[in-house]
Image (cartoon, rainbow, N blue to C red):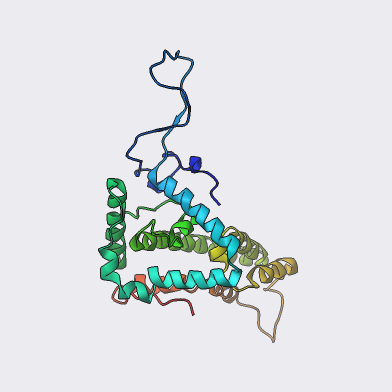
Amino acid sequence: MIGSTNAYSTTQSGGATAFKATSKAERTSGTPENQGVTNTQTSSTQTISTLGRQLADSASRAEARDRTLSRSELADKAKSILNNIVGDSYYANKTLHDSEVPKTSDPELLARAKQATAFVNDASRGGHSIKNPFSGLSREQLSNIIYDDSGTYTVNERHAAWRESYDQEEAWREKACAQAMDEYNRTGKLTNFFREGLDHFKGLPAIEQAQYPKDYASDLESKISLDFNYRTHQAEGKSEDPMSLIKMLFDQSPKQLSQLSQEKTNPDSPTIKSNP
């Protein structure tokens, strides 16, 4: 989790560097100005982005949530939240979400919310002309936005963060699938693929891990330990199909991801069903 707002200076905020605080700098040194400071006595200053401060606060709330909720409670909370920001409830209240304005006079926050709404609507039509305001943030940062129901972010901002998280997940899957097929063609095994899947799973925030089957990690660990050769092993006279094994692993992940794929290929059917 994010331990300090210092990790989010304007040089470290990924795609969100444009959202600087109105106050250009926050001094972290107690050195007063205009008191004959020599050239070798420079004060320490740091500009912290508005989004950086919000992310740090969101991280603190996420840590508190993860400490107090069980795995099943986290899964239930995630399901409810996703329904509100990308599922049936979201689309049933789309007009309301599109008109939502942050409770602030900060022009940068207002502009970001407006951009998020424009991006979401453009993306839902299959467009790519509007930049996602959260492009380039890490999976953990995106998760902290998506599942933050404190009112810090508008619903469309959280929807935009979810789309960026989805795109990053899909990019990882495409790469992992290609590597898995290469491994199978060379060795007949998928051990490294299972290891990559386990590492990926362990790197996810707790609320996202909770959406996977309870035995997801232990199942992968057993496959890694087995170090099985699927090409030479015969089961009922047929070799295992590597793509079926890869698909089996991906199918255990949250259903939301595959459902957006259908939306992208069929823009006329925007509803994304909630996880069963």
Which one is in front, 53 or 187?
53
Residue 193, quarter of the rendered image: bottom right
Residue 251, quarter of the rendered image: bottom right
Give percent across and percent down for residue 221.
70, 67
Q: Is residue 176 above or below residue 14?
A: below
Give percent across and percent down for residue 212.
57, 71
Q: Is residue 98 above or below residue 20?
A: below
Residue 260, quarter of the rendered image: bottom left
Q: Residue furthest right?
A: 226
Which one is in front, 90 or 182?
90
Quick check: can you spot residue 86? no
Quick check: can you spot residue 168? yes
- Would residue 124 appear left or right of 182 to someone viewing this image? left
Q: Is residue 217 above or below residue 135?
A: below
- Would residue 114 appear left or right of 73 to someone viewing this image? left
Give percent across and percent down for residue 60.
52, 53
Residue at point 31%, 76% (across, down): 92
Residue at point 55%, 74% (across, down): 247
